[in-house]
Amino acid sequence: MTTDDEAAVETIVGEFASDRSRLLDIVEAVQHRFGFVSDTAVHAMAARLGIHAVEIEEMVSFYAFFDRQPHGHVRIRLSRTPISIMRGAEDVARAFETALGIGMGETSADGGFTLQWTSDIGMADQEPAALVNGRVLTRIAAADVPAIVAAFRDGHREGPQCMPNAVVRSSLVQAGPLLTGPFDPNDGLRAALTMTPDAVIAEIAASKLRGRGGAGFPTGTKWRLTRKSPGREHIVACNADEGEPGTFKDRVLLTEFSDLVFAGVTIAGYALGARQGLVYLRGEYAYLWEKLQAVLRSRRAHGLLGANICGHAGFDFDIRIQLGAGAYICGEESAMIESLEGKRGSPRDRPPYPTERGYLQQPTAVDNVETYMCASRSMAKGAAWFRGFGTVASTGTKLMCVSGDCARPGVYEVPFGITVNDLLDLAGGDGAAYVQVSGPSGQSVAPKDFGRRIAYEDLSTGGSTMVFGPQRDVLDIALQFAEFFVAESCGWCVPCRVGTTLLREGMEKIVAGRATLSDIAATETLAHTVVRMSRCGLGQSAPNPILTTMRSFPELYEARMQHTAFVPRVTLQEALADAVQAQGREPVAEAV
Amino acid sequence: MAGEIIRFIVDGVDVDAVPGQSILEACDVAGIYIPRLCYHPDLEPGGNCRLCTCNVNGRNIAACITPAAQGMRVENNTTSLTDDRRTIIEMLFVEGEHPCPYCVASGDCELQALGYRLKMAAPTQPYRWPRRKIDATHPDITLDHDRCILCSRCIRASRMEDGKTIFGFDGRGITMTLNVDAEGGLGDTQMKAIDKAAHVCPVACIVINRDSYRVPNGSRRFDKAPIGSDIEARRKP
């Protein structure tokens, strides 16, 4: 790094007013400018921000999309999920390896390309997919790979304007009452502004809207608690970090209904008396950045954001989008708030809850993208209309993201209360032998339970619905989910940090067909400990793929079980591998 | 808050707390020991180890970070919680390297003492055998990363007590390690052996040089009495 480069880092820090809480943006800009975050850049940032280098390092090293070492000019991140694997991601990986002459996780000698796996990127309906320098490539076949490599080899970092596979298809297969147009996306906002903030909250409460991220907390209650909490200012935060593998509804909403979502955030801003709305957009969706900024600019130009919104004197509100940097845990609301403050995305202990002390210690309402969409539509059409859909405990509709072994993957807007069977019929997944509801953190559902309902009171879900046919290996899929949690554990607390790794090892032994009954029982016991002792929802739900497949498919575990008292974790061959290598000969077998 | 007394129940025993006290702090005063590892009485709680997790009104939460509240029903000394806590201690034993018989901290190590107290025989989980470097760049302090249990005590002490910010985490998840505020190692930082951060490590990760055997093995804190005995001695009959 030259003096000029240091000056460039200082300029970047200056652009964010040397504000420590904007460290995520600052580091993102540095990473973008130099391709990695060097020691010199760390020291330059630290000096300018008046903090210690170790504080910057602990933040930078937390996020998958930041690098401390230089990497290839073109960064290929191939999505690794059970869905991408069954759609041929491993063949695509081999094709990239052949085309580039490097293995996964390596950088080519000329510094041109880096090839690696990444966790789900929100494209389960169009896998195999990859992020290439932030651009999304979908439905990649092994045969497409040479053209992709050539396009980036000849072009600049972003690649040519038109290139193979660089299309994210719209995936709204079936719109329901909330998303069927035509409607003016700002009707709900205008209706809200004719009411008092308390009346808006009462209306949302009357709709019985509950959080669409999966936890299902009543939105009206959350808004009321936040409004009631004393603070310098109140904050509205929108969780667009949809990292749960198999979920892509927020991608669809932000692509096709962003005005409706921003109107919902603005309604919340009015109801809470907030001046600031924050949208936390997952780093994988950086490709939506320009489009969403254009929508915000247009809203400001039309008086839908800014001062005196819709002519309502004194209602000043604006929205800032914060881009994440590759961390599933940031979908957890308190981790998201930490990340919004430019820190590691480690969850906070509660109490205090974000409604009391959230972003910068101010009362904060964090809601899912879909929740704001629902709020927007409910305000436009009235609470009674909204309550008319769904069940008594789960009102309205739910956006379900169906992927995997089905004819028509995509997003379906369905009323709460729909059975798994009905959803499978819609998506053409009638041959399903196993459905993973609500992603890895949710539960595995066997055909005998396909009559269960999608609702908070039965199968509660954020929307992810992964369908697997009879040809799939359920236990191997559970192992892949276990690996996902190892990669995404934040590391703050022991039970999750170490437990997720031990569970993966236990599951490896089971899948390899080497586990005894006592091994399986020990893995189950350990899984329960991780559930009971972990600090946040990630650790508490990380054992779900193992525990729920044990419950739904006990016969599969039994089929792989060794009916002996003990099988060592390591085979004799593995144990002797080093010695065999050193001596250059196999051990002499003893005569029996 | 003056005079207001919060009364709650721990394993059937009434415990009094003053507003602002955590469950763990109130129990310490009352002579009820809740196993803990990352908690240190001189520091803000971190909530890293989860060993002090208790069942409070039917929900598991960490006692060190949970304020005592009127009428809480807390379960602490139960078979289930003891089993879970033992598993956490086991996790730490297999995550790092903890060879008690020849470790400088033996007898003075809270991890070892909790292993005894919670009756851990031998770890049932596979060792991970990490390969982390020893940082011997400081003339008075050795940093043995293999022993580190990532409890964040030194991080908190350095930031809050010493005002130095010598330590931080690096990476995330199972690959997370302790990091120091200098590329050249601890010797290039402002760390001093008299710093609070040098005296809060529960294991033998941060070791003061030429000091380890001032008290010989066999005569140390936990050689004489199990961990928590001092707290339990406060219990009124």
Image (cartoon, rainbow, N blue to C red):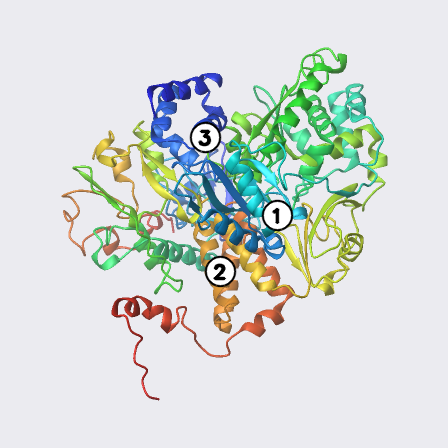
| Residue type, label 2 | Leu
| Residue type, label 3 | Gln
Q: CA distance from mark 1 to mark 2?
A: 39 Å
Label 3: few (<14), some (14–19) or many (≥20) C-alpha neighbours in 10 Å: many
Residue A153: x and y, percent? 50, 38
Residue for point 53% across, 58% down: A528
Residue for point 66% across, 47% down: A126
Asked whether disc 1 touches disc 3, contact meaning CB atoms under 8 Å apart, the reply is no
Residue under disc 3 on the same chain as residue under disc 2: yes
For marks 1 and 2, the one nearer the N-term is: 1
Depicted A211 relative to depicted A314: above or below = below
Q: Residue B201, can we see it?
A: yes
Question: Splitting the image into 4 quarters, where does residue A88 fall?
Answer: bottom right
Q: CA distance from mark 3 to mark 2?
A: 39 Å
Residue A31 has which mark? 3
Quarter the C terminus of chain A occupies: bottom left
For marks 3 and 2, the one nearer the N-term is: 3
Label 1: few (<14), some (14–19) or many (≥20) C-alpha neighbours in 10 Å: many
Q: Residue A346, can we see it?
A: no
The chain letter under disc 1 is A
Residue for point 55% across, 32% down: A158
Front disc: 1 or 3: 1
- Outermost bottom residue: A592
Q: Which residue is mark 2?
A: A526
